[in-house]
Image: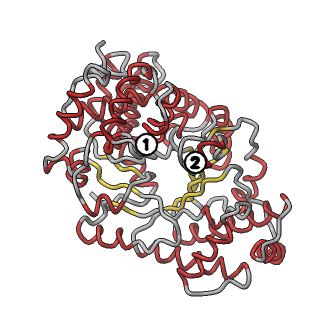
Amino acid sequence: MAFLDQNYLLGGETAFELFQQVGDLPIVDPHTHADVQQILDDQPFADIWQAEAATDHYVWEMLRKRGVDENLITGNAGNREKWMAMAEVFPWIAGSPTYEWIHLDLRRQLGVEELVNRDNAATIWRKTAEILQKPEMRPRALLRRMKVETLASTDDPVDSLEAHRKLAAECPGLVRPTFRPDQAMNIFKDSWRSYITSLERRFNHKFHKLQDLVEALRQAHDWFAEHGCVASDHGLETPYGYHVEAEDADAVFRKAYNGHELEQDEVIAFMSYLLNQLAEMDAEKDWVFQLHIGVTRDIRDSLFNTIGADSGGDVSDHLIDYVEPLAPLLNRFDGRLKTVLYCIEPGHQASVAALCRAFGAKVNPGSAWWLNDSPIGMKRQLEYVGSVDLLANLAGMVSDSRKLLSYGSRHEMFRRTLCEVLGAMVDRGQMPREVAGELACYLCYQRPRELFGLAGLA
């Protein structure tokens, strides 16, 4: 088997045949960090560094591991200089999914077969400089070529969604916003009060009590719905979902609003109350309530202090317990809230699968997320979910990508891994071949369309 050839990740004939069924299906990607303004502007990429590495913290982390200076990653060095530094060490990150993703991008989207290394760096830089200026390499044309039917961005409640509105007029249904109220939730952060001020400005209303905040979030929720939103997303280290009386949560809000330090039990009370309120909004609109669980943020001080959040300093923690704090919320909304659970810690997959099994059809596992979205992580999750919960109830693949070029590559990696898992089960006599084919097509396309209410787009 040659590198990234037609048998890539496929260990047998059955897996190969299954991939022939799903490889060209349209992409429905319900969770990305798409730059909507970039898609609206539809301008060509400046160069290959901008297209592949300027916004991708997966790349940044790998380069740091090989000792590349930060100035050549996120600093002020020129893009060509950064690309050459990346190519110098790139062979040494083989085995990482990042190595495969970037080469898949180059081969599938740009037609560049050369391996990224010191010897080929200048050639790839020149060749891609010409290719990236072609009309077919502009963002919207790329999305069409990758067969992206629809994708969801990640958006804050203060966002006016003006870029979404303009893009929807030109490309109906292509990009939908996702309601991400983390900054309102994170009352423990130093930035919380300034964020509340920005939310007050957005809705031209001073918050004198917690219900004022809830009402502003409801207005934002309604605004997002008017712009095609079908899901919320919540990035929480621990998803506190306890029942808390409104007056108790209000007392915590007033205390924090007035600049006083909170105790941990007060933080938990506020976050629990607000998460339940947001879940209620989703249930009323039949949105999908997505929980991204278990990330310990910004663990590396030097990165956070010099670059900021989302720079590659987040980790998982296997000691986080989310079953006990989340159970009250799942019980409160049992049978009436479409919920998807994503976890960053591989050891939490067992708890996710068991929770989803216990709570039936409305609560389901999301695709292997972040540190798990590699062939090995996806394979382990698919095998485990299939044996404990149901493969058919997996929410489908999401790229979680911060760069446009990787949507196709990440979905291809998932589809090939899924076909390998299903093909092996067929070959071991665990399921019929025709059932495996139906299941593969369902999970790669129909399932996310149905779950997120996007089935009318095609």
**Residues under numbered marks 1 and 2 in contact, where contact means CB atoms less than 8 Å apart:** no
Q: Residue at x 37, y 32 (%)?
A: 101
Q: Which is more foreground, mark 1 or mark 2?
A: 2
Query: Alpha-carbon neighbours of circle 2 within 10 Å: few (<14), some, or many (≥20)?
Result: few
Query: Is residue 127 left or right of 20 when viewed as pictured?
Result: left
Q: Quadrant of residue 76?
A: top left
Q: Position of residue 148 (x, y in %)?
A: 29, 50
Q: Quadrant of residue 200?
A: bottom right
Disc marking residue 189: none
Q: Position of residue 356 (x, y in %)?
A: 63, 45
Q: Give the residue pinned by disc 2.
A: 306
Q: Position of residue 313 (x, y in %)?
A: 60, 41
Disc marking residue 56: 1
Query: Is residue 383 left or right of 98 when viewed as pictured?
Result: right
Q: Secondary structure at mark 2?
A: helix
Q: Earlier in the sequence, mark 1 or mark 2?
A: 1
Query: Is residue 115 left or right of 187 when viewed as pictured?
Result: left
- Farthest top residue in view: 1
